[in-house]
Amino acid sequence: MGLKARLNLDKLLAEKGMSQRELARITGIRQPSINDMCNGKYDRHVPLKNIALICEALNEPVEKLIVLERVEDN
């Protein structure tokens, strides 16, 4: 078994009552990129700067944004 990191952004936005558009406005991250992060379609590495901006905007620690899940090896 291995570990896979995923972003918990969609859940955090819902908990905060914040839209993707609002997060984009606050952070300066493009809304389509935020949408991809929310839907697990972000196939590139998320820059640490963006992770820091998101955590700051949501007033949450990185541990709530990034979730590690166990996955079975093939």
Image (cartoon, grey):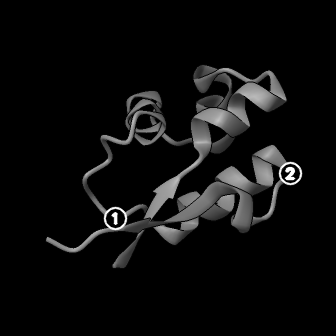
Q: Residue at the spot x=66%, y=51% of the render? A: 54
Q: Secondary structure at mark 2?
A: loop
Which quadrant holds the N terminus? bottom left
Task: Tell me the amino acid under the disc marked 1.
Answer: His
Q: Position of residue 10 (x, y in %)?
A: 59, 34
Viewer-closest of 17 and 69: 69
Q: Position of residue 68 (x, y in %)?
A: 53, 67
Q: Residue at the spot x=72%, y=26% of the render? A: 14
Task: Tell me the amino acid under the disc marked 2.
Answer: Asn
Residue 29: which numbered mark, if any?
Answer: none
Choose top left, top right, bottom left or bottom right for residue 4: bottom left
* Image height of 4 relative to 8, above or below: below
Viewer-closest of 58 and 11: 11
Q: Is residue 62 left or right of residue 30?
A: right
Q: Which residue is mark 2?
A: 59
Choose top left, top right, bottom left or bottom right for residue 55: bottom right
Q: Secondary structure at mark 1?
A: loop
Q: Which residue is mark 1?
A: 45
Q: Residues within 10 Å of mark 2 (few under 14, many from 20)?
A: few
